[in-house]
Image (spheres, rainbow, N blue to C red):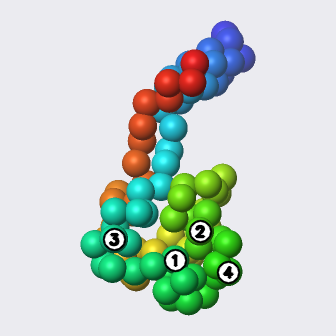
Amino acid sequence: MFIFLKIYAKLYIKSTWRCFVLRLNIKPLMDAQKLNRNQLSKELKIGYVAACNLYEGNTQRIYFDTLENLCHVLHCTPNDILIFEKDDTE
């Protein structure tokens, strides 16, 4: 019985999370601060290509220290940077 509940819970979580995608919302925050990608890369102490990927949302992962530095530079919270959107690819 315990094994069945454990398997069922995993399947339920997978099926519900497929509906939503976590995305970065950095463009409007940078525009409000009047920052460009080069300035962002210098402030975060990351490469220009990595800053461009963050800006465009083309990243698969983000480290907590990078997220913390983004919040500091953009004067916001992680709730402003990370947004859930409905996944329409299914």
**Mark 3 crowd level (few <14, some 14–19, many ≥20, 10 Å Cα):** few
Identify residue for label 1: 37
Question: Mark 2 touching mark 1, by CB under 8 A?
Answer: yes
Q: In which quarter of the image is the N terminus?
A: top right
Question: Mark 2 touching mark 3, by CB under 8 A?
Answer: no
Q: Which percent across, then down, holds residue 22? A: 50, 44
Given residues 38 and 21, the one toward you in this image is: 38
Given residues 5 and 35, the one toward you in this image is: 35
Q: Which of marks 1 and 4 is in front?
A: 1
Given residues 52 and 20, the one toward you in this image is: 52
Res 81 seen here: yes
Q: Which of marks 1 and 4 is nearer the N terminus?
A: 1
**Mark 2 crowd level (few <14, some 14–19, many ≥20, 10 Å Cα):** some
User: Considering only vertical position in the picture, is 57 above or below 20?
Assistant: below
Residue under the image location 43 percent in, 30 percent down? 86
| The quadrant where residue 36 appears | bottom left
Label 1: state its secondary structure.
helix
Q: Distance between the residues labelled 4 and 3?
A: 20 Å
User: Considering only vertical position in the picture, is 35 above or below 80?
Assistant: below
Q: Earlier in the sequence, mark 2 or mark 3?
A: 3
Residue under the image location 66 percent in, 52 percent down? 60
Q: Which percent across, then down, holds residue 61? A: 64, 57
Q: Earlier in the sequence, mark 2 or mark 1?
A: 1
Identify residue for label 2: 52
Q: Which of marks 4 and 2 is nearer the N terminus?
A: 4
Tell me the amino acid under the disc marked 2.
Answer: Cys
Q: Quadrant of the C terminus?
A: top right
Res 68 seen here: no
Q: Residue 47 carries which label?
A: 4
Identify residue for label 3: 31
